[in-house]
Image: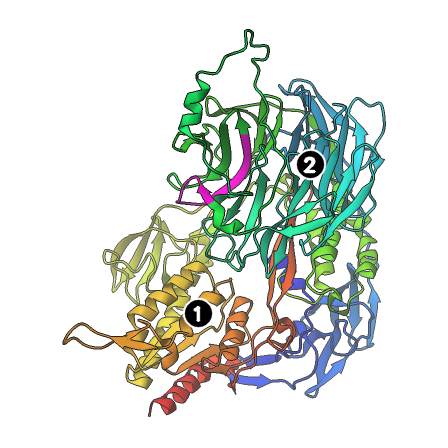
Amino acid sequence: ESSNQVARKRYKGPFNPDIQSYNIKTKQYKKYTDWEGKDFGTSIDKSGNIYFISDEANGEYNLYTFDKGKKTGLTKFSTSIKTPVVNANGGKIVFEKDYQLWMYDVSAKKAEKLNIQLLRNNTLPAEKDYDVVRSISNFDLSPDGKKLAFTSRGELFVSDVEGKFIQHINKKNAERAREVKWMSDNKTLLFNQTSGGYLNLYTVAADGSSPVKQITADKKDDRSVVLNKTRTKAVYLSGRDEVRLLDLKTLDSKMLVKDEIWAFQNSDPGFSPNDEYVYFTAVRNFEQDIFIHHLKDNKTIDLTNTGVTESNPVWSPDGKYIYFNSTRTRPSYPFGLQNPRIYRMALERIDDPYRSDKYNDLFKTADKKEKDTTKKEPVVTPITVDLENIMERLEQVGPSFGSQFLANVIQKGEKTFVLYTSDHAEGRPALWKTTLEPFENPKTERIAGADAFGIDYAESGDKAMILFNGGIYKLNLDQNKVDPVVISTTFRKNLAAEFAQIFEEAWAQVEENYYDEKFHGLDWYATKTRYQAFIPKLNNRSDLRILLSDMLGELNSSHQGFTSNGDEENIILSNRTMETGIVFENTDPYKVKYIVKKTNADKKSIDVQPGDVLVKVNDEMVDNNMDRNYYFSRPSLDKEIKLTFNRGGQPIDVKIHPQNSMANSLYDEWIDNNQKRVDEKSRNRIAYHCMKNMGLPELDKFLIDMTQDFYKKDAMILDLRYNTGGNVHDEVLKFLSQRTYLQWKYREGKMAPQANFAPSDKPIILLTNEQSLSDAEMTSQGFKALKLGKIVGSGTYHWIIFTSGAGLVDGSFVRLPSWGCYTLEGKDIESVGVTPDIQVPMNFEDRINHRDPQLDRAIEEIMKQLK
């Protein structure tokens, strides 16, 4: 999550943080009275008076202080303030309200807006040049094969297929055009563009003979537009739940199917070769099934109907098969598709051709004249769908290694070419084709020059073109290569209009995809109106980030964020801190305290000892009055650094390879100390494992530790404190749920259990705290629901929504909390968190004195069970 979003989030969950202070001179710790509400933004004057903001009174942040230990409100604003800062003497507090500076006078007990006038260089309305080179996002090839239409940065363009003659279609607005299709007259473009942030359908004449015409006016995204072969109909997805049909002659739209399709992360729909059916995917238990809808009978059939995902369907041109992607033995959630393969589904029980029939064809009387020597289109017989045992007729196409993603299926005569991207060769993504032909083994070949994982395909007659990595290429299937089409043209936009567009898109994406239809009780439309009023006041991209982060923060939920950067923000100067793994004394900043294990200084050849005093860095004498970090900051990370230390009057030279950070090593140091604590207090009877996050590398570490250490011991403590989340909760809980169900042995050998590892046979304690968040909370809730053991510590962070995101017009990105996580009783974990079975608080004083009452209590509870 972006730092600006975290800093400004207006989170109002039930967990109450404490305001605490520690007096450095007297070494006394003080905790202030608990209260309702959330409290952030603390500032302190030289007399020790604390000023902070809290939303306790009315749900909006106001200024507070302590008067004789009692919390006292100083302001009563109806909109929130932020970042209060008190002056040293304590008489004035300056803060921000509604993006303006205010001052609170402590003695007068009055707040007023500061009368500050600024002269600024308003650069956003100025036009800026962009080029379409490597920045094309969508395209189509005209039916006559002579013209291209494409979009770049929300603008619409037309050119010849060689990219020489390019015309920028004037839409007369700053709205974002995303998808574009040629209609059958080779002149009219069907495209979608935003209106109020939502994608709607439009037409425009590429030759300028008719203006832009709006076809739909939906308060939801109309997207994934696919035309039939004759370009008389289009099928598209609308919002979260509609598959719609557009008649390209009348431009009338009608709903075909209402189902759970989600408003993003969709497979494209399409038509059967004879236009009898429309196919699409809909979601069942978070997984996509492939459906076909008979247009005449208005009947829908779930073709696949499994508990795993089948996606990216393509109907073969001869009408006999549907090709698709699937990982047939594993659901796609929560990990996503794991090494998907390509399959084809025979719609009937199709027999292979017979060699004897081909032999007999050799003796048939040929026509005197071959009137048609051109390539013939595949013959489409009437389509029959035999549902009996249809999933048993699947055949895998292509490699059985790596990940394959279907792009298209092409037929020429008796040959079928299956196009897909794959990384099965050396792990590098590229475009491949597998050729299927009667009486021949399948042949798989790489398409030279098309190294990408995502491609778009368009064809017209014998011409085929693809788009990847922002560029358009001619596809030569016979020679297995692509040739780039060099397209370059400049167009102009201004950032003021683009920022307004980004705001609209971001708001609409959240409106359509936010997991809670009640928006946590917030009027999302009124929120848009309030924040949109500030759009004309934006002066740079940083302002845009602040504005959108504040608006998202009104939702009072986790897993939100907005990121945006542009080349106008490029900086010339930068600094990197070079970490060595050496920790210096706080009171003597050039004296070595110790070496952190598992860092680059922790090597056999490096002789650095506690008590050594740093005197030179790269042969430059250090100044003891200078901040030490000055000598370890460079524009980029150096490959090596030379340090000279004074040890008892003798110079010691060492060379170290600097590292980006040693935060991970310090984390490991904390874990190692915990391990020692557990070993000592349990006399090596309890295994201890800490997961820093719920990512795949940490899952591997967990499983390795379980199979190397835990199975030898009598109990386990799994520490999820400070865990930052991920998505491996299911794998962790599956492992922990295993129990012994039988034993086996070789003759006269020792009995061995099945399953090999049975954690649930032994006591398990799970440790959580207020910084256990996201997938750590899913794991904790699952641990509790499955009754795998006790949870010890403090309540989790209330920060669990599964998330995705959407790209905006200029490449900005809005993070979308789209899937809520609930207990078996239906409670939103984001709201209630996970409460430990045994509450053990841990405060500031515990931390600075290296006490860990939570870990101690976990050890104590397990030892009771082991007696």
* Front-lying residue, 152 or 444: 444
Where residue 83 sits: x, y (%)?
A: 69, 66
Structural crowding at the residue carrying mark 2, measured as other residues with C-alpha within 10 Å and reported as few (<14), some (14–19) or many (≥20): some
Q: Give the residues drawn in magenta, as a range.
A: 395-410
Ranked by sequence position, the earlier of labels 1 and 2 is 2
Structural crowding at the residue carrying mark 1, measured as other residues with C-alpha within 10 Å and reported as few (<14), some (14–19) or many (≥20): few
Report the label total. Answer: 2
* Circle 1 residue: 734
User: Most extreme residue toward the top, as rendered?
Assistant: 368
Quadrant in the picture for the C terminus: bottom left
Q: Residue at x 54, y 28 (%)?
A: 411
The amino acid pointed to by label 2 is Asp
* Front-lying residue, 80 or 303: 303
Q: Residue at x 74, y 70 (%)?
A: 93
Q: Residue at x 71, y 25 (%)?
A: 158
Structure colour scheme: rainbow
Q: What secondary structure is found at the residue carrying circle 2?
A: loop
Q: What secondary structure is found at the residue carrying circle 1?
A: helix
Where residue 635 sits: x, y (%)?
A: 48, 45
The disc label shown at residue 472, or none: none
Q: Main secondary structure of the magenta part?
A: strand
- Please say whether residue 307 is visible from this viewpoint: yes
* Circle 2 residue: 275
- Describe residue 458's horizontal placement relative to residue 551 as left or right: left
